[in-house]
Each structure stands twice: as structure tokens, then as C-alpha cells.
Image (spheres, coloured by chain):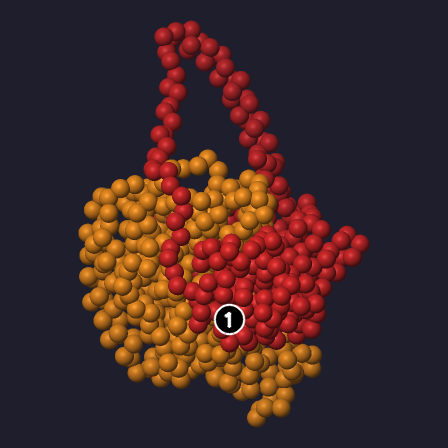
Chain colours: A red, B orange
């Protein structure tokens, strides 16, 4: 802008009636700025959908002049933090905030950006409040907030802007950048003190009121009656697929010593009676693991061509690596389970990869490496996938502890 | 600044150099309008041609699976809303089915029908949003407004049903939270009638549009073999010719009672993925009409239990077909109040893993088209 707005009060204010003129300039400038907010297209999760809904035909954010969603932070003066902020994303948010030109405003949309919301307890990756990273002007509660609430937030921001004056330009606010800071405990203690004072003040009045109204009985409320339906058991849907007995026969033809999980002693008669809902769960040793998966994939009748997932379970003394396979031709599923030894002394559990058999296994194995710390040998690209490279520990292990990040659920 | 990178960024198979022009790396995301959230793609380019893509995920990893281990099964239902928030009724259903199977809980007839009606409504709702965003990614803003206009009508119904517009939390083991509101079925049928004409309108607006066709036909081809190898499911797999729909092949609930077709694509390009989704909306309308016709009276929930427990050392596994594909819930129990481990299998995880196969060899602008037709929901990938 060619005119330096800050010169206006310096020139006008000493003149007779000049203060009124400065106020008029203030009013016009603020009106123009508050009615043409340019938000940044920034949305991480669920709230972003409500932000899109606010921009769409029904709610129409352009009634308030904020419809020009910009893809570049350099063109935006408002960032609506729509959705949860995680530790990995917070570094990028800092960059975005710093790239925006002054004066810039921040609306924190949704419970996650206020305090972590539903992700407050037992969580190792979510930043518990976006104001720990960037300074926030308006908070909008809700999970997610309705579009009307977002519009209300924008109106509140407009009020805030219209209170500004060119006599005292807005001071650029630095990043807070303290993801571990505890902003709630001090406030909560202060509220508790306040409440205690109020209760003490009220105690006398209450006694007095009770003496004046001896017949009064407090309303205790009614419990909602539980809606109860019929008592019934689960009835599985009939479906046609290869029977468990056939699958076991085909498998035991080649690998006779591979048992079913929890059903090692099962007889052939019992096997024939299992419903098609039962998914055969084979337990293999590490030495047979890849050979067995390869056999299942290439067997003409079984034809397990679709890899649903690879995952792991921590049983404290060992890990189970689970492979879930599905056949698009036979419509049946097979689970494979392989035990991986683990102890405190030997902290590097290892197992062979199956990513050469299924390309999809590549990412699933990286996820297990990230969250459980199981290394897959011969894997083409073994590095963390969900967490940052400098994250210490493997969070889905049962012995994972990180008191700096995790707030334990108190109930 | 030295533009030629000598170091290979992590994940790439070979360094830049050796193309027609000098190859270079480009970063896309995690803050990018067409990555539908916070997905980050590193791309190796030769001029404008994509040579290799390395996706980086985890920017919205919210440790839902860790949180699940300290809450009871029923307390976990609201967290599944936040996985795939565009088909949250279906993800709710996935966990409820796993609990019902493990804890032996039955579902009354009416509740089964309510579930089907609500899920199919949500499939249409999700695809409408995808349709709007797909066209917007390709540069047509009008479709976004059209799609959201129809979507709001279904959102109104959901709001009346469970009080929420996005995170529904409506299903419970054994049925639903509440019965359908009054005059709900006639309104659904009205929306079905309306949607039929609307879909024809959409065809005229976008499907038959020459520019859209030029940009999608023959672009982003995913072969059947590669789709299978990557574990693709849902519309992405069906566009590549894999006849796999959980509703048809492993019917859950009462899906085996309804008459509907599974649309399949021939080539597996972007246009196939587009038409498969449009056709799915038509099939959902068919299911809705049948379900609304047959909806019986009765209970909407079987008898509640104070806590749902899966017996010790047992696991239960359920698959549902969300708007994006096979969403599986795997619950492992040690007999305690809380689940020992829950694993959610998200369909998008496999699709994004396959993006290198789909988009390399095409132009950079086609990468945006491919992403738009995958319809990814990033919090579902990262969990």
C-alpha cells in the first residue's frame, strides 16, 4: 500500500477535530479489513469437512467476505486451524504461520485445537491445544463445530479487528512453540480457588434459606429408563466360500505340522462342523513363515491373492506377527500367525519380510517397525512411517512410557 | 541455491538425472489443497513427467489404536467416527459387528434394516462430497457447490437421526442408539427420487464433459495384478476389474437379502474409478428403496449389557464395505474390561501405497487427478 497508515494519526491528531477524522479512517480501514478476510486452505481432519460445508452453497461463507480460500500462506491473512494438530504436523504449521504476512489472525476450530479434545488422554502424538504452537485469536468449541459456529467465530474475529486502531498498530505475535507447556493446570487451580471462595460466601446464605423454607425438598431427578430389547444371540449370515475343512486339508497336505491357533488338538469331525464364519488361523514358525505365505499365494485352489493387512500383537514376552489374507476367487480368509521372540536384553526382534510377495505388505511392515520395533529383514525400505524419525521408543509396545507426552486417563 | 540434488531423498530407488532433461525432486504437501488433508508426496520429475512418487504419511497420526487399549469396547465407538469421518456409520458398524461376533450379541430385524438404510445413505453422502471435490481438483468449482447442496439434504436427515452432522456415533452392539424419527422413511424416498434426476444432471455436467474425459480417460491406469498385489479394495479395485465387494462376497448384516449390482471397470483408469462411484450411488438408491419398502416394526436394539467382553484369548474380525473399500476391525482380547489390541484396516492405506504404480509416467497435473479419484481420507490412513 502506498500510504503509510501510521502517519495519519501523527498528522491528523494535533489538528482541531483531527481525532474524529482519525477515528473515521480507523472505522473505514477496519471495516474493509474485517470484511475481506482471506483464509488459508488448511484442514487436517474432520473439522475441514465442516469448513468446506461452510464454504459451500448452504452456509455460504462469502456473505461475510471470507470466501477467498487461498492455497498459499503468503496470500492469506487468516488461518482456520481445522482439525487435530499432531507433533509431526506442528513443525509445518509453524512454517505456515511464519510465512503469512502481518497482520494475521488464527481461528482454532474444534475441541482438538483447544485441548486435544477426544485425544487428550493416553495419547503420544497429538499436541494438546494449538495455542501451544501458534497464538490463537478465536477458539470455537465443538467436535466438530457446526458451520454456524464457524461463522460465529468469523464474526467474533471481525469484532476483534474492528476494535483495532492505527494509533497503536497490532504488534506481531511470536510463536508460542512449546508443545509440552501446561496451560490448563494453573487455570484449573485458580478456578478451584475461586469456586471455594464462592462456596464459602454462599454457605451462610444457603443455611439461612434452608431455615426460611423448611418444607423444601430438592429435586433429585429421574434416571432415564434403559431401553431394553429382546435378549438374543448372534446369528451369522449364511455365505458360500471354501469350507474350513477343505482349507485345512489343502494346507496339511504340504505342511502337515502347522496347527490352528487355540485348536491344536482338533479332530477331523470337529473341523468339519466349524461354521464358514470361522477363519482358520495357522501358527507357523519363523523358518517356515515366508515359504508358507508363498505357498498360500500360489496354491491353485486356495489362491490367497489379496493381502488385507499385516499387523502385530505384543504379548509382553513375545510378539505375534499376523498376516490376514483373502481370496477373491474362493471368497475365504486365512490368518497366519508367527511368533517373534523378544526380551528386555534382546531388544531387536527380527522376522523375514513378505513384501516381495505382496507390494502392499511394504507399508504394513513399516508400520509394525514404527509402532512395535520389529525389524523385517530384506525389506527394501525399512524406516518409520507414521512418527517422526527422532521419536524415541515404539508406542504400541505394552511397556512404552513417555510421561512428557502421555497424560494417563484418571478413571 | 544448488537446484541439483546429489543426495537421494529417503524412499527413492535412484537419484535424479538421466532423463530427457535434468531430473529434479518436487515436494507436494503436507499443506497442499489437492492432497485432501495432510498427505505429503515427494515426486521425482523429468520436465513435467512424473518418474517416481514417494508418499509420506503420519501427519495426522492420532494414536487411536493406543487409546483403544485403555477404554472399554463401547467407549471406542466414538473414536471410530474419527477414522473415516466421511463414512463414519460404516466404521461404527465395523466395530459393532466385531463386538457382536465376539460377545455373542444379536440384532433385531428392524435394527438390521435401519443399519442398511443409514449406511447406504452415508455412502451416497460420501460419494457426493467426493464428486464435488473431484471436479474442484480438476478446476470446476460449480460441481463442488452442486455436490454439497445435495449432501446437505442427507446431512439434515442424519442430524435429525442422531444429532450430529459428521461424527455420528449412532450404532451400538445389538442395534442402534435410537429408533428412526417420525416421517423419516418418506423423506428418504423423496431424496432417492430426487437423487435419480440429480445423477442424470451430474452426468450432463461432469461425466459427459469433454475436458473431464480428456483428463481422466487413459490416465492413472492401475492393472488388476498391481491392484491385487497392493491390497486395493472398494471402488479402486472394482475399477481395475476385481470383482470384490464385501457386501456381496462376505455379506454382513442383511446385505444378502437385497438385489443390487456391483459395477466393474475395464481398464482401471481415472474415468473408470469415476464411473464406478457414480454407478455405486445408483445401486445404493436401489438398496435404499428395497430396504425402505421392507422395513419391519419392532425393536431397534436387543437387550443391553453393562459391558461387552470378548472371552479370553479370542479375537474377532469383521469387515465392512465403506465408501472407500474394505474396512476391517480386528479385536484381540485378554478377557479384561478393555480390548488388548485393536487394529483397524483402512482401505486408503493400500490405495496411497499404490499411487506410485498409478501416477508415474503421467504428467504432474495427472497426479492430482489420480489423487482425486482415489478419494483418500488421510486420518483414516494414519489412524
Q: Can residue B211 be seen at all in this image of the molecule?
A: yes
For mark 1, give the secondary structure: loop
Q: Position of residue A101 (x, y in %)?
A: 52, 63
Position of B369 relative to A110 (above/below): below
* Left/right of residue A161 with respect to residue B4 in the rendered view: left
* Left/right of residue B47 with respect to residue B365 in the rendered view: right
Total labels drawn: 1
Position of B106 relative to B28 (above/below): above
Label 1: chain letter: A
Q: Position of residue B283 (x, y in %)?
A: 28, 66
* Left/right of residue A93 with respect to residue B92 in the rendered view: right
Q: Position of residue A88 (x, y in %)?
A: 60, 59
Q: Residues within 10 Å of mark 1 (few under 14, many from 20)?
A: many
Q: Position of residue B122 (x, y in %)?
A: 34, 57
Q: Can residue B148 be seen at all in this image of the molecule?
A: no
Q: Who's the residue at 80% across and 54% down the image?
A: A345
Rendering quarter of residue A312: bottom right
Tag 1 residue: A302
Q: Who's the residue at 50% across and 15% down the image?
A: A203
The extreme right residue here reads: A345
Q: Nearer the viewer, residue B50 or A358?
A: A358
The extreme bottom residue here reads: B20
Q: Who's the residue at 65% across and 83% down the image?
A: B15
Image quarter in which the C terminus of chain A is found: top right
Q: Who's the residue at 60% across and 73% down the image?
A: A294
Q: Nearer the viewer, residue B87 or A181?
A: B87
Position of A114 relative to B244 (above/below): above
Amino acid at each position: 500500500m502506498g500510504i503509510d497508515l501510521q502517519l495519519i494519526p501523527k498528522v491528523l491528531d494535533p489538528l482541531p477535530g483531527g481525532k474524529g477524522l482519525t477515528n473515521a479512517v480507523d472505522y473505514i480501514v477496519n471495516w474493509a479489513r474485517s470484511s475481506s478476510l482471506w483464509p488459508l486452505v488448511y484442514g487436517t481432519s474432520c473439522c475441514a469437512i465442516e469448513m468446506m460445508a461452510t464454504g459451500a452453497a448452504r452456509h455460504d461463507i462469502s456473505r461475510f467476505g471470507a470466501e477467498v480460500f487461498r492455497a498459499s500462506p503468503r496470500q492469506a491473512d487468516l488461518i482456520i486451524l481445522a482439525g487435530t494438530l499432531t507433533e509431526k504436523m506442528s513443525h509445518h504449521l509453524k512454517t505456515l504461520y511464519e510465512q503469512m504476512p502481518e497482520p494475521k489472525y488464527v481461528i482454532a476450530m474444534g475441541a482438538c485445537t483447544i485441548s486435544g479434545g477426544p485425544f487428550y488422554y493416553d495419547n503420544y502424538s497429538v499436541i494438546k491445544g494449538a495455542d501451544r504452537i501458534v497464538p490463537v485469536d478465536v477458539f470455537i468449541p465443538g467436535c466438530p463445530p457446526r458451520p454456524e459456529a464457524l461463522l460465529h467465530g468469523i464474526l467474533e474475529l471481525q469484532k476483534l479487528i474492528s476494535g483495532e486502531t492505527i494509533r497503536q498498530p497490532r504488534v506481531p505475535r511470536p510463536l508460542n512453540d512449546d508443545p509440552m507447556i501446561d496451560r490448563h493446570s494453573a487455570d484449573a487451580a485458580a478456578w478451584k480457588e475461586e469456586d471455594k471462595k464462592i462456596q464459602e460466601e454462599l454457605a451462610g446464605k444457603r443455611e439461612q434459606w434452608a431455615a426460611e423454607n423448611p418444607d423444601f425438598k430438592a429435586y433429585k431427578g429421574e434416571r432415564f429408563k434403559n431401553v431394553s430389547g429382546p435378549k438374543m444371540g448372534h446369528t451369522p449370515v449364511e455365505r458360500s466360500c471354501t469350507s474350513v475343512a477343505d482349507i485345512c486339508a489343502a494346507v496339511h497336505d504340504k505342511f502337515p505340522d502347522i496347527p490352528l491357533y487355540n485348536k491344536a488338538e482338533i479332530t477331523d469331525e470337529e473341523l468339519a462342523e466349524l461354521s464358514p464364519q470361522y477363519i482358520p488361523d495357522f501358527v507357523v514358525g519363523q523358518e517356515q513363515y515366508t515359504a508358507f505365505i508363498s505357498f498360500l499365494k500360489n496354491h491353485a485352489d486356495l489362491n490367497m491373492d489379496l493381502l488385507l493387512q499385516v499387523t502385530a500383537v505384543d504379548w509382553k514376552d513375545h510378539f505375534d506377527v499376523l498376516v490376514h489374507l483373502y481370496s477373491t476367487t474362493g471368497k475365504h480368509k486365512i490368518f497366519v500367525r508367527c511368533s517373534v521372540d523378544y526380551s528386555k536384553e534382546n531388544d531387536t526382534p527380527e522376522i523375514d519380510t513378505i513384501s516381495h510377495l505382496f507390494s502392499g505388505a511394504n507399508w504394513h511392515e513399516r508400520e509394525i517397525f514404527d509402532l512395535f520395533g520389529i525389524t523385517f529383514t530384506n525389506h527394501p525400505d525399512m524406516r518409520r512411517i507414521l512418527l517422526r524419525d527422532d521419536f524415541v521408543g515404539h508406542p504400541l509396545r505394552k511397556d512404552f512410557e513417555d510421561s512428557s507426552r502421555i497424560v494417563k486417563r484418571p478413571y | 541455491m544448488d537446484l541439483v540434488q546429489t543426495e537421494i531423498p529417503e524412499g527413492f530407488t535412484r537419484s535424479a538425472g538421466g532423463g530427457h532433461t535434468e531430473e529434479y525432486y518436487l515436494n507436494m504437501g503436507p499443506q497442499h489443497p489437492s492432497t485432501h488433508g495432510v498427505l505429503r508426496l515427494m515426486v521425482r520429475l523429468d520436465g513435467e513427467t512424473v518418474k517416481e512418487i514417494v508418499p509420506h504419511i503420519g501427519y495426522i497420526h492420532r494414536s487411536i489404536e493406543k487409546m483403544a487399549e485403555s477404554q472399554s469396547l463401547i467407549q471406542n465407538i466414538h473414536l471410530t467416527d474419527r477414522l473415516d469421518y466421511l463414512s463414519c456409520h460404516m466404521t461404527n458398524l465395523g466395530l459393532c459387528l466385531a463386538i457382536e461376533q465376539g460377545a455373542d450379541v444379536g440384532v433385531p430385524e428392524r435394527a438390521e434394516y435401519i443399519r442398511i438404510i443409514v449406511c447406504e445413505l452415508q455412502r451416497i453422502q460420501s460419494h457426493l462430497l467426493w464428486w464435488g471435490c473431484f471436479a474442484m481438483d480438476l478446476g470446476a468449482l460449480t460441481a463442488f457447490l452442486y455436490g454439497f447442496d445435495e449432501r446437505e439434504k442427507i446431512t439434515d436427515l442424519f442430524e435429525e437421526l442422531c444429532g450430529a452432522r459428521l461424527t455420528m456415533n449412532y450404532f451400538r452392539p445389538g442395534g442402534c442408539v435410537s429408533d428412526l424419527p417420525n416421517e423419516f422413511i418418506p423423506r428418504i424416498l423423496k431424496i432417492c427420487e430426487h437423487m435419480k434426476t440429480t445423477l442424470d444432471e451430474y452426468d450432463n455436467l461432469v461425466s459427459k464433459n469433454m475436458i473431464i474425459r480428456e483428463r481422466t480417460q487413459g490416465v492413472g491406469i492401475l492393472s488388476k495384478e498391481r491392484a491385487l498385489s497392493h491390497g486395493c479394495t472398494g471402488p479402486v479395485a472394482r475399477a481395475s476389474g476385481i470383482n470384490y465387494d464385501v457386501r456381496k462376497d462376505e455379506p454382513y448384516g442383511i446385505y444378502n437379502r437385497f438385489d443390487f449390482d456391483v459395477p466393474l471397470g475395464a481398464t482401471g483408469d481415472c474415468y473408470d474409478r469415476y464411473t464406478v462411484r457414480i454407478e455405486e450411488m445408483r445401486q445404493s438408491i436401489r438398496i435404499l428403496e428395497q430396504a425402505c419398502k421392507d422395513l419391519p416394526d419392532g425393536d431397534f436394539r436387543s437387550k443391553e449389557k453393562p459391558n461387552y467382553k470378548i472371552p479370553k484369548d479370542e479375537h474377532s474380525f469383521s469387515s465392512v464395505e465403506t465408501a472407500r473399500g474394505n474396512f476391517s476391525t480386528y479385536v484381540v482380547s485378554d478377557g479384561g474390561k478393555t480390548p488388548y489390541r485393536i487394529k483397524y484396516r483402512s482401505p486408503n492405506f493400500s490405495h496411497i501405497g499404490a499411487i506410485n504404480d498409478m501416477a508415474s509416467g503421467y504428467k504432474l497435473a495427472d497426479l492430482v487427478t489420480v489423487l482425486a479419484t482415489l478419494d483418500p481420507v488421510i486420518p483414516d490412513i494414519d489412524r
